[in-house]
Amino acid sequence: MNLSSTGDPLSPLDLSLRGDKVRSEISDREALVTMSPSDVQWLTGFTGSNGIVYLDHEKFILLTDKRYEEQGPQQIRESCSSAEVMISKTPIEDIPSLALNKIIKVDPNLITWRAALQLEEIIEGGITPSTPLKALRAQKDECEIGRIALAARIVDEALNETIPFLSGNPSEMEIATHLDFKIREKGASGNAYQTIVASGVNSSKPHAQPSAKKIENGDLVIIDVGAVVDGYRSDMTRTFIIGEPSVLQQKYMTVVRESQEEAIKILKPGTACAELDRQCRKKIEEAGWGDLFIHGTGHGVGLDIHEAPAINSKSIENLLTGMVVTIEPGIYFSDNCGVRWEDLYEITESGARQLTLSTKSPQV
Amino acid sequence: MNLSSTGDPLSPLDLSLRGDKVRSEISDREALVTMSPSDVQWLTGFTGSNGIVYLDHEKFILLTDKRYEEQGPQQIRESCSSAEVMISKTPIEDIPSLALNKIIKVDPNLITWRAALQLEEIIEGGITPSTPLKALRAQKDECEIGRIALAARIVDEALNETIPFLSGNPSEMEIATHLDFKIREKGASGNAYQTIVASGVNSSKPHAQPSAKKIENGDLVIIDVGAVVDGYRSDMTRTFIIGEPSVLQQKYMTVVRESQEEAIKILKPGTACAELDRQCRKKIEEAGWGDLFIHGTGHGVGLDIHEAPAINSKSIENLLTGMVVTIEPGIYFSDNCGVRWEDLYEITESGARQLTLSTKSPQV
């Protein structure tokens, strides 16, 4: 049994109201279809590789194949979803008999062109590129946040047990392997994404993959790591310095950290995500390194590692309670080094709660 | 440095001819666009999260964003690809200026509806749902097969070092964690997919996830596991019995194994994949369990865990040299138990070479 971040057992997920949440966002002439694994899990608890959900004001059906004849109904029962399972050899082809002449909403970012073409051909009422799920999923309930917080706590502990090895001249891959093993040992089902351990010159690549390069004295080391608990993910980045930092290295780390703190000051319901992005760039721009902060400020995290809201200059969303978001400023000096600090926050009524609690003492 | 399955260093990948391979499959009025990470890696060596390849008879461009300004050119250089990097804030929007009035081929299974709608709107020559890449990628070169074989060897060794723990009453999760750690320790970058360790009644679910259930005397245990080397994957399943098998358990295992052997007899260039599927079902059907073999017989494996050719009753492809395919019959008794044997084969001029070499002695 998984324990929550306070050490109590995690409350079981209760998906009983999710079908109705979607229904309140669609008319009775409309239906929703999704084939995205995380949408399907959010609605039904089902985690198989082949699931389609069909939902309208009367029906709520999980279409899957015979491989999941046992697993489908079991996961729906365990998560209190009100969906029913329909076993089908050709799930898409069964949708018209459910939809009749309803207009079907699908998320155009989460369906292949092939599936869209097929649906367009067979659905009498047509399909329309729109979904209420993205916004609904962005605001998490307590049980979901409990799982994300536990994933974050597991990473905190695993990283804490890995830091002592950083100074022993290991390779990036050895550190990543140790860290990932500790994460599993502590009860996570896996990594939220491929762990980044990027040292020295490799830290200048925001998405470097762990290599055979040895971590050496004087290196900056970026570790970007998350875990999965019951499908829910965490996301955190720390930057370490092996040995005594140079004056410049110290400055990089301080400026990026102060930038993050500027954003955190306005992390509360109602803040525009675009404003959060602007605020997070201020100190870095003042230091003259604005051009080196080459990615967005953050993103929502849940069943997917990147979900709503996006936090960048083009964002149109405002923060809402229950959202779980990263704030992750970074600067990258080409062929030289990089620094990134990333934390995960739950947006609460009064502001924000930090879920990633690993030390920010960079010197090892 | 990774060593091949013979212990020699792996030859570096050489992608220099891949652009021309695609060109020989498209006319000079056509271009190819792909956003699929594995297609992009196959063509350019690039492994970032945001890459689009545009390719016509004159141009071969990798479009990506500033995060990959260093990594993109470096990976292209290292893999001898002839692609050029174009850094772009909005890669899709830059495609019309490359394509002019060419017709663009895209794989409809590997592009979102959103991206297809966007391309349809901005591409003067239009887009068409077709790709030569699926067939080209199905036939691997020696360097690719070397990586898949090494991934398979790593799993063989890791499983060999895990089997002794099966009889000690561990949980499924503990076994999965140990196995996955060994795979990383031996140099793989990760798992080819989430490892399945399904014991007792859980083995009746073909895609069970490792649970806290303890592995007990008398259990059948299905372990389905693969590794990744340089992006290339392996895939294997073994079934174990803890303690003395019952007569029935022994029969299940023998019948499924004989079914696999029937298929392997015709595993050679020219065999129709649909025929391979029929042949693999024979012994299981003769035993009266045809309805319990509830999935396809196999699939190609490469940069993706499921790629061409599909091996099932609807397959239209024939085997060709250089393909790497699984043969994986299984039977699943609802709420009771299951058995699956899966091996990975390279199709050679004279037949097939088995790449997964773990013991098939099921008793632990």
Image: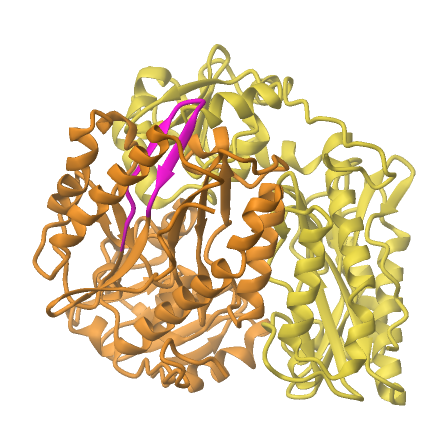
Chain colours: A orange, B yellow
**Which residue is painted at 49% across and 20% down in the image?**
B73
**Which residue is painted at 55% across and 22% down in the image?**
B76
Horizontal side of residue A199 vs B235, given as left or right: left
Q: Is residue B101 visible?
A: no
Task: Report x, y in % for residue A163.
Answer: 51, 53
In the image, B46 versus B141, the foreground residue is B46
Q: Is residue B71 above or below residue B162?
A: above
**Which residue is painted at 25% across and 81% down in the image?**
A17
Task: Report x, y in % for residue B53.
Answer: 46, 26
Quarter of the figure with residue A84: bottom left
In the image, B46 versus B70, the foreground residue is B70
Q: Is residue B134 above or below residue A311?
A: above
The answer to whether residue B286 is magenta is: no
Horizontal side of residue A281 vs A248, given as left or right: left
Q: Which residue in the rendered view is the most extreme toward the front?
A: A244
In the image, B84 versus B97, the foreground residue is B84
Task: Report x, y in % for residue A202.
Answer: 49, 32
Q: Which residue in the rendered view is the most extreme toward the left?
A: A270
- Magenta span covers which residues? A326-341
Q: Main secondary structure of the magenta part?
A: strand
**Which residue is painted at 65% across and 73% down in the image?**
B174
Horizontal side of residue A87 vs B63, given as left or right: right
Task: Report x, y in % for residue A146.
Answer: 34, 75
